Image (cartoon, rainbow, N blue to C red):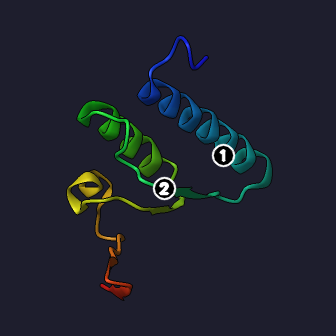
Amino acid sequence: MEDTLSRGQLKLLMCALRLAQGEFLTRESGRRCLYLIDDFASELDDERRGLLASRLKATQSQVFVSAISAEHVIDMSDENSKMFTVEKGKITD
């Protein structure tokens, strides 16, 4: 697949597969999944990032995301969001 898909397409495909697995597990168990995404914005353009953010929000699951810049995860923010910043090894909110 790496010869056919771009890195962004491959990342989006893998996220779609994980979301499908999560939806299946939620239906079967009645419990929501926890999603961890490292470097959310890498390899994705604004449109794809927005698409992924909306799908993650639609799951109503808890999502932990790391990103280089806060502007890359602003689409995921809502009244239930909490953002932390790590700078020089110190965590602030």
Residue under numbered circle 2: 38
Vertical side of 5 occupied by 71: above or below = below
Residue under the image location 35 percent in, 59 percent down = 67
User: In the picture shown, does residue 70 fall above or below 91?
Assistant: above
User: Which of the two discs, 1 and 2, labels the residue nearer the N terminus?
Assistant: 1
Local secondary structure at mark 2? loop
Pointer 2 local density, CA inside 10 Å: few below 14, some 14–19, many at least 20: few
Q: Residue at x 41, y 39 (%)?
A: 52
Element type where label 1 sits in the image: helix
Q: Is residue 75 left or right of residue 57?
A: left
Amino acid at the residue labelled 1: Gly
- Given the current orientation, which residue lies at the most extreme right position? 28
Q: Position of residue 41 (x, y in %)?
A: 34, 46
Q: Residue furthest top?
A: 4
Q: Position of residue 21 (x, y in %)?
A: 69, 40
In the picture, measured across the screen, residue 3 lies left or right of residue 32, that is left
Q: Residue at x 53, y 11 (%)?
A: 4
The answer to whether the residues at label 1 and label 2 have Cβ atoms under 8 Å apart is no
Residue wearing tag 1:
22
Q: Gap in Å between the C-alphas at discs 1 and 2? A: 17 Å
Instruction: Count residues near mark 1 (Cα–Cα under 10 Å), then give few for <14, some for 14-19, many for 20+.
Output: some
- Which amino acid is tagged 2? Asp
Residue closer to the observer: 69 or 15: 69
Residue ID at (74%, 47%): 25
Task: Determine which of the numbered discs, if any, sits on residue 87 in the image.
Answer: none
Quadrant of the image containing the N terminus: top right
Point out the image quarter for the C terminus. Answer: bottom left
Percent x, y for residue 15?
Answer: 54, 38
> Is 37 positioned to the left or the right of 39 in the image?
right
Q: Nearer the viewer, mark 1 or mark 2?
A: 2
